[in-house]
Amino acid sequence: MGLHGPKPIPFESFYRLEDRGYETLCWIWIGFIHPSQGYGMCDRFKLIMNEQYSHRIAWRLKHKRRIPKNKQMHHKCAEGLSIKKAFFQRRCCNPDHLRVTTAAINNKLCRENRGRGLIGNLNSAKLTEKDIPKIRRKYASGKYTQTELGKKFGISSYQISSIVTRKTWKRVV
């Protein structure tokens, strides 16, 4: 215990080095992984940096500046991989493997590099494009709450909220 609270844990203690076939070693996050997004998360840095995704924290620590608003991080080490393998590359937090980009460019790069860049195409995804209009119709009818729909489709009420407010699955009508 230090003078001002617990001794800080260095960021390096949260990942392991792994050769995944890219130019340099990936830093694979070994902490909490967001169950549906696949990104490493660390609440320890949320208060300090207003960030919780491990790859964004690592980039900021290296470059000593904020990531511009409305920008995303593109994992260069995921280029050319199948969608399943690329999904697991989201755990990489090596700042040399990350590029700051817009959402439009990031999505375009994902589609170009993998032929399909959307998480809904994963075999392990709980929803398909056919489920989205059903969820939106059922919620709009007023007969179901978001919690009830979440249980029915095996996802969280937060995910249902994101679907019905079109924060996610925007491309599906």
Image (cartoon, grey):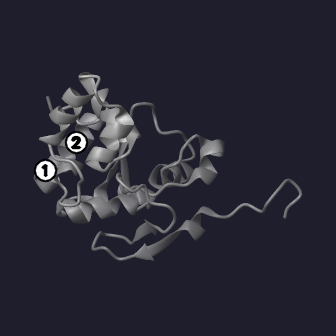
**Number of the label disc, if any, that sits on residue 116:** 1
Judging depth in this view, the residue of 19 and 145 nearest the camera is 145
State which quadrant residue 97 falls in. bottom left
Residue 170 screen position, x and y as percent:
22, 31
- SS of the residue under disc 1: loop
State which quadrant residue 18 falls in. bottom left
Q: In the picture, which quadrant includes the N terminus?
A: bottom right
State which quadrant residue 139 falls in. top left
Q: Which three-letter amino acid code belongs to the residue tagged 1?
A: Arg
Residue 124 screen position, x and y as percent:
23, 60
Q: Which three-letter amino acid code belongs to the residue tagged 2?
A: Asn
Task: Please state if 5 lies on the left or on the right of 114 as rendered.
Answer: right
At x 21%, y 48%, the residue is 127
Residue 158 screen position, x and y as percent:
40, 39
Q: Residue furthest top?
A: 141
Judging depth in this view, the residue of 166 and 160 nearest the camera is 160
At x 58%, y 51%, the residue is 43
* Residue 47, placed above or below residue 90: above
Q: Name the residue beneath numbered marker 2.
A: 107
Lower sequence index among marks 2 and 1: 2
Q: Residue furthest front?
A: 143
Residue 121: in sight, yes or no?
A: yes
Q: In the picture, which quadrant includes the C terminus?
A: top left
Q: Residues within 10 Å of mark 1 (few under 14, many from 20)?
A: some
Spatial CA span between label 2 and label 1: 9 Å
